[in-house]
Image (cartoon, helix red, strand yellow):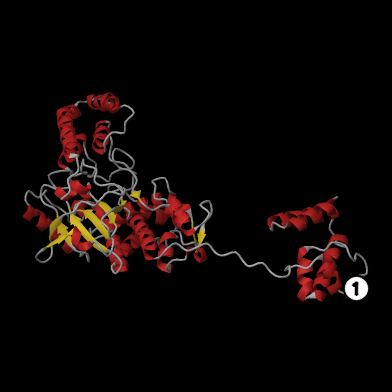
């Protein structure tokens, strides 16, 4: 196991937090509490420097945080891959989209990157920030999904959906938009569901224990992945990271049974193994419980039939990991971290996290900390771009078309020779389209010129209105010739 020089900092934070924990019980408004004052003091200690993740989380808890997205140590993912990276690789304009015919890679990878399925990869398709509308809607729907999939298996049954419909349908057996919204949003208040909200004491205790996340920050993108060997849950033996690298990239999944969002999202990760199992290796590391009965206990877990006391020994943790495997039936190998959380701290994997490690053992993608940063589709996009990067060289820019021996559009004088003899207007400049059509279809070109003349001179519409209409259409079609003609008509 590669150790990172973070343990001393974590112990210092634990000591500081333990010293101020009794202050959390003081009464009064949050902004005037002793804990909030200590948080402000910590800010002055770090000054202009960015505090470590553990310090940020401690300050957020002391200031009354309820573990919302963007608070404390909940932040975005790190990745080697991004929109500028993809645009540069494909030789595309970073201000424009990438259509399918410009992508040059496998169809399945294009579909992954084209998140909204409009046929063009846009910067917004690769944006997984908390302000992105897709991410916000996905987060809201996940909350609703977890409530409807009440058995905690991470899957909604037909009966679950039928029960929702039957409960909201009107007397005629149908459902209005208001009834549909009411059924989905029943009990939603934007915060914790009843019985799930933590106290400051609970959060501080969870911080000290590593249940709401490790105070160590784990490797960053570009760092070597810490190596480990852990015992497998199913069967005998162990699995080592080194055994899974060399030929394929490795997806590492960190999680635990009592984290509701992890249970809800895990099937999506397991589905990635079914799709990419021939191109990447997958391994889940079972880590410390996030919501044990003797910690931050959640009523939503009780409703799902999930009730676990924090394991005190390795064998107890193996037993709880077995419950997870029985409930969610993972297809990927699952190994169990030791009771001291050696691997969980090395990767900062608690309560849930995703990593992509390239075949050389270097971190290529590191998700944000769960639950908010645990985004299987973001991982899939990183994996897609990694496979695109490693499968073939970047496509060369399309070669310029060879110069034609003769101009594609003949000069005006030559075009007039191809057209029928004009009654009036002969030898005057022709529009480019007429000269081009005259080469193969001289009579058609002449007829169109007559129609164009009739439209400008014999239409029953007011001449000024006709010219303005022509200009609007020409501008929409980006035709400079037609715009100039319209202006001439207007004059």
**Picture coordinates of residue 330, whole percent (x, y):** 21, 64
**Picture coordinates of residue 262, whole percent (x, y):** 25, 54
Residue 31 position (above or below residue 351): above
Residue 63 position (above or below residue 315): above
Residue 147 position (above or below residue 30): below
Asked whether 391 or 270 is in front, the reply is 391
Asked whether 224 or 62 is in front, the reply is 224
Q: Is residue 298 visible?
A: no
**Picture coordinates of residue 8, whole percent (x, y):** 16, 36
**Picture coordinates of residue 368, whole percent (x, y):** 31, 47
Residue at (76, 71) in percent of width and height = 437
Q: Is residue 61 left or right of residue 322?
A: right
Dividing the picture into quadrants, the one containing residue 453 is bottom right
Residue at (19, 33) in percent of width and height = 13
Q: Is residue 269 visible?
A: yes
**Count of number-bearing discs:** 1
Check disc 1 and report its element: helix, strand or loop.
loop
Q: Is residue 93 left or right of residue 300?
A: right
Label 1 CA crowd tier, 10 Å (few <14, some 14–19, many 20+): few
Residue at mark 1: 421
Q: Is residue 338 left or right of residue 364?
A: left
Dividing the picture into quadrants, the one containing residue 284 is bottom left
């Amino acid at each position: 196991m590669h150790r990172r020089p973070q343990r001393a900092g974590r112990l210092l934070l634990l000591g500081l937090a333990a010293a101020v924990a009794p202050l959390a019980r003081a009464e009064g408004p949050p902004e005037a509490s002793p804990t909030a004052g200590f948080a402000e003091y910590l800010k002055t200690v770090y000054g202009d420097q960015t505090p470590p993740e553990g310090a940020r989380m401690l300050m957020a808890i002391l200031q009354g945080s309820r573990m919302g997205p963007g608070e404390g140590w909940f932040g975005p993912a790190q990745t080697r891959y991004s929109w500028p990276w993809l645009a540069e690789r494909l030789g595309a304009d970073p201000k424009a989209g990438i259509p399918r015919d410009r992508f040059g890679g496998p169809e399945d990878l294009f579909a992954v990157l084209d998140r909204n399925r409009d046929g063009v990869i846009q910067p917004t398709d690769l944006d997984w920030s908390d302000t992105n509308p897709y991410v916000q809607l996905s987060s809201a729907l996940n909350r609703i999904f977890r409530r409807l999939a009440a058995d905690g298996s991470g899957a909604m049954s037909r009966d679950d959906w039928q029960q929702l419909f039957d409960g909201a349908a009107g007397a005629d057996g149908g459902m209005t938009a208001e009834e549909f919204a009411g059924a989905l949003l029943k009990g939603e208040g934007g915060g914790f569901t009843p019985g799930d909200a933590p106290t400051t004491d609970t959060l501080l205790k969870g911080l000290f224990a590593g249940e709401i996340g490790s105070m160590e920050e784990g490797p960053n993108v570009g760092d070597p992945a810490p190596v480990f060997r852990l015992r497998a849950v199913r069967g005998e033996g162990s699995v080592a990271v080194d055994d899974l690298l060399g030929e394929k990239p490795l997806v590492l999944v960190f999680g635990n049974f009592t984290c509701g969002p992890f249970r809800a999202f895990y099937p999506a990760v397991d589905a990635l193994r079914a799709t990419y199992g021939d191109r990447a290796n997958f391994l889940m590391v079972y880590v410390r419980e996030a919501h044990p009965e003797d910690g931050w206990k959640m009523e939503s877990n009780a409703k799902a039939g999930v009730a676990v006391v924090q394991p005190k020994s390795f064998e107890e943790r193996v037993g709880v990991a077995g419950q997870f495997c029985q409930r969610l039936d993972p297809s990927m190998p699952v190994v169990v971290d030791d009771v001291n959380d050696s691997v969980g701290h090395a990767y900062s994997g608690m309560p849930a996290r995703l990593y992509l490690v390239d075949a050389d053992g270097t971190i290529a993608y590191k998700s944000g900390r769960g639950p908010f940063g645990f985004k299987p589709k973001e991982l899939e996009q990183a994996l897609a771009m990694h496979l695109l990067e490693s499968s073939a060289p970047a496509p060369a820019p399309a070669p310029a078309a060879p110069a034609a021996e003769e101009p594609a559009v003949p000069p005006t004088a030559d075009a007039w020779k191809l057209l029928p003899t004009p009654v009036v207007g002969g030898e005057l400049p022709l529009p480019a389209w007429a000269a081009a059509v005259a080469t193969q279809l001289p009579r058609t070109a002449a007829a169109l010129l007559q129609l164009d003349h009739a439209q400008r001179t014999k239409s029953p519409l007011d001449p000024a209105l006709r010219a303005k209409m022509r200009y609007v259409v020409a501008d929409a079609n980006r035709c400079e010739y037609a715009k100039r003609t319209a202006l001439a008509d207007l004059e």
